[in-house]
């Protein structure tokens, strides 16, 4: 696959750009990965941007975001850290299963980022045909990359594809995570869900962590990879450091 100079851009329309935010590991006190986020000129997020683009260009958007994420992250200093790069796939069903992997791998070959440091995050995984999900997870695994299913929430329908297709990671929806301080039902759901995912060898990431109380609850459930305002907000073109101080570092 040949990438031209346009692939240095984050997307095929003016005003689109990439921001990054960290996934913090509360055990090591380090950034486990940086997630690349597609943003529009007025702050639109990936799915909103997708809705504004003709369906026949959705696959191109994902491919160019994948390549652009590698270039931008390496420009920002990812190569000087041990963190992985989490690349979003918003239209997984619109392209061949490994199109984003091919684009990111070629960009990685040019910049020195190996596939073993890549994570591909599948948005809307419950809407992707099962065989396509299986091909994504297996194709990424064979290349040395990881797969994450993003957005597991209250709806129990999302649990089935997680245990069937076994991504390396599952990210919990921010609405589910944010309410665990005050909602008994959400705490009960997470208390049951987290160990079931771990039993299948799936690492859990919690999004939407905004308060220390939420972080402590998550730790009690055995969830140690977190994102949200408490960790760091997204920053365009930069790799923001985590705001959470590791206890050992603070001593």
Image (spheres, grey):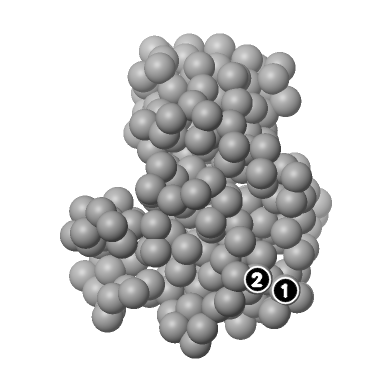
- Res. 127 image quadrant: top left
Query: Where residue 216 appears, x then y in whole percent?
Result: 58, 33
243 in relation to 194, above or below: below
Mark 1–mark 2 distance (CA, rounded to whole Å): 5 Å
Q: Which residue is mark 1?
A: 109
Q: Quadrant of the N terminus?
A: bottom right
Query: Where residue 130 appears, x then y in whole percent?
Result: 49, 26
Residue at 38%, 48% in the rendered image: 94
- Res. 173 image quadrant: top left
Category of crowding for the residue at label 1, using alpha-carbon neighbours closer than 10 angstroms: few (below 14), some (14–19), many (at least 20): few
Residue at 59%, 19% in the rendered image: 164
Query: Where residue 79 appears, x then y in whole percent?
Result: 73, 74
Q: Secondary structure at mark 2?
A: helix
Q: Is residue 174 visible?
A: no
Task: Please give the count of numbered marks on the rendered protein.
Answer: 2
Q: Nearer the viewer, residue 130 or 201?
A: 130
Q: Quadrant of the C terminus?
A: bottom right
Q: Nearer the viewer, residue 98 or 178?
A: 98
198 in relation to 233, above or below: above
Determine whether label 1 and label 2 are within 8 Å by CB.
yes
Category of crowding for the residue at label 2, using alpha-carbon neighbours closer than 10 angstroms: few (below 14), some (14–19), many (at least 20): many
Q: Residue furthest bottom?
A: 5
Residue at 60%, 57% in the rendered image: 101
Q: Is residue 122 visible?
A: yes
Q: Which residue is mark 2?
A: 106
Q: Is residue 101 left or right of residue 115?
A: left
Q: Secondary structure at mark 1?
A: helix
Q: Is residue 51 left or right of residue 195?
A: left
Q: Nearer the viewer, residue 38 or 50?
A: 50
Query: Where residue 158 appears, x then y in whole percent?
Result: 44, 22
Residue at 53%, 56% in the rendered image: 99
């Amino acid at each position: 696959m040949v990438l031209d100079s346009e692939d240095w851009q984050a997307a095929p329309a003016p005003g689109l750009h990439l921001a990054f935010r960290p996934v913090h590991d509360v055990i090591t006190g380090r950034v486990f990965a940086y997630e690349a986020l597609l943003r529009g000129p007025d702050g639109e997020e990936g799915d909103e941007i997708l809705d504004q683009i003709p369906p026949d260009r959705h696959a191109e958007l994902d491919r160019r975001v994948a390549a652009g994420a590698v270039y931008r992250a390496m420009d920002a200093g990812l190569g000087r850290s041990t963190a992985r790069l989490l690349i979003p796939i918003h239209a997984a069903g619109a392209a061949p299963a490994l199109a984003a992997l091919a684009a990111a791998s070629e960009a990685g070959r040019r910049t020195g980022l190996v596939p073993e440091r890549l994570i591909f995050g599948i948005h809307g995984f419950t809407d992707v045909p099962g065989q396509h999900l299986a091909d994504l997870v297996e194709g990424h695994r064979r290349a040395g990359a990881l797969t994450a299913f993003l957005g597991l929430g209250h709806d129990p329908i999302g649990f089935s594809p997680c245990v069937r297709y076994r991504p390396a990671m599952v990210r919990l929806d921010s609405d589910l995570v944010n309410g665990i301080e005050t909602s008994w039902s959400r705490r009960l759901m997470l208390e049951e869900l987290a160990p079931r995912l771990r039993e299948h060898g799936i690492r859990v990431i919690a999004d939407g962590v905004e308060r220390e109380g939420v972080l402590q609850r998550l730790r009690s459930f055995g969830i140690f990879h977190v994102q949200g305002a408490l960790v760091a907000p997204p920053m365009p073109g930069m790799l923001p450091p985590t705001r959470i101080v590791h206890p050992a570092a603070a001593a």
